[in-house]
Image (tube, rainbow, N blue to C red):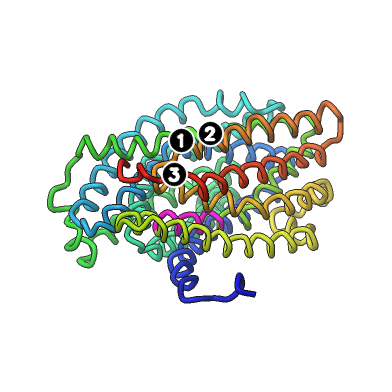
Amino acid sequence: MKLFSLTSEHRYILKIALPAIAGLSTQMVVSLVDTAMVGRLPDAEYNLAAMGIGVFATWAVVSLFSSLATGTHVLIARSFGEKNDEGCGEILNTAIILSFLIGIVVACLVVFFSGDIAGFFAADKKVGVLAGDYLHYRFMGIPFFLITVSYRGFFFGIGKTKIFMYSGVLANLLNIIFNYLFIYGGFGFKGMGLAGAGLGSTVATICDALFYFSVSFLPLYKNRFNYFKRFRFIKEIALRIIKISLPVSLQNIFILIGFLSFIAITGLIGILEQAASNVIFSALLISLLPCFGFGIAVQTLVGNTIGRGDVKLAKHYGFETSKIASIYTVIVGIIFFTFPRGVLFLTTNEQQVIETAVPALRIAALGQIFYSVGVVLANGLQAVGKTLYVMLAEVVANWFVFVPIAYLLGVVFQLGLIGAWSALPFYVILYAIVIFVKFKFGKWENYKKV
């Protein structure tokens, strides 16, 4: 019973975690609503399969650079724990300039090659064309997205996760409105189908960047951290951000390529199975995004306490947060296993897709229970600079366990979608064990070198 008792310590963790979870949950709602909108277009199976490729390709490229938030978050959390407010402001300024310049380059490249990227991962030509149109419009907003990434790292680092929550509610509400408008048409706009989902997300992202910029002018933050007093790029800080972020960037890109490979594997099984997998991934966000919220809390708590020189308390916060996150994933797993059709109906009304996805969702329900431990403690390790270890742990588990087993069971042994999704528990459990062992028994002597 002690595990489930809510102590003052747990309340402190939740005070930081819940706003982050709320902000991330709004992204989950948008994903579910977007999938539901696309799932009700003509040729739903083609559009859903294309959206799966488009979304994962977007995550793959965005994650390569959005991890700059991790470097910003870790450095600001450390500086904030050391009570170095001026340093926090300098880190934010450098992060914004660095992110925007990178965003311009990435946007130009991906918009130009969007068709080639989509075609590489699509087994069906029609699916590839639809996914390419989505990526073309979606990546126009990347520079503005990376600006918001820098601001997130700043507010996470100083423990003001409510700003992210407000941003999430506003931006994702606008995302739903714009996506509906551009997908189906209205008010003088012609419906664009799946491509409209990409354009709607870009417009909402621009609004999100404007929101963060406005908040940064509040005297509460502007006067304390003085980031506008000397708005400049500091090379040394940029290199520290990159040093922390690069392994996270590589981890994200490799893992999302792994998941894209998994989507491609389900495409070899069939278009219906590929569409069903996309729906399952959308449903899994109900579990995964809150885990990332707890991870944000751990990164802040560990960074702040490390800044004060208290390693023991930093580890303690990691384990206590992972306990709370695990309780959540167990509850979600029970719901997914017991009411799979109700969960899947949130994303599509295509009965064939739902029935195909039901057994696989039940398998995923069991696997995702253990993901909370891996995600939360991995964020704690990143906060003390162990980003390379976390990257290697997840890449090995994904590329050398998850993807090969999925192909072997799903395609070679012809067990279909059930076989492919049976690989998920192997991947998640292995990753959780490796991260737990490192967090508990690893040496943190070099944490001051970050």
Report the amino acid beneath label 2. Answer: Leu
Residue 448, above or below 410: below
Q: Quadrant of residue 313?
A: bottom left
Mark 3, Cα crowd under 10 Å, few <14 / some 14-19 / many 20+, is: few
Magenta residues, start to end: 291-300
- Using the image, tell me which numbered label, if any, was put on residue 392: 2
Q: Nearer the viewer, mark 3 or mark 2?
A: 3
Q: Nearer the viewer, mark 3 or mark 1?
A: 3
In the rendered image, residue 446, in percent from the top left (x then y), is placed at 35, 42
- The total of numbered circles placed on residues is 3
Tell me the crowding category of disc 1: few under 14, some 14 to 19, or many 20 or more residues within 10 angstroms, Cα based: some
In the picture of the structure, the residue carrying the numbered disc 1 is 388
Residue depicted at 73% across the width and 49% down the height: 364
In the picture, the quarter occupied by the C terminus is: top left
Q: Earlier in the sequence, mark 3 or mark 2?
A: 2
Residue 200 picture location, percent across and down: 50, 48
Residue indicated by mark 3:
443
144 left or right of 352 in image: left
Q: Secondary structure at mark 3?
A: loop
| Quadrant the N terminus occupies | bottom right
Pointer 3 or 1: first along the chain: 1
Q: What percent of the width, then of the height, locates residue 63?
A: 48, 39
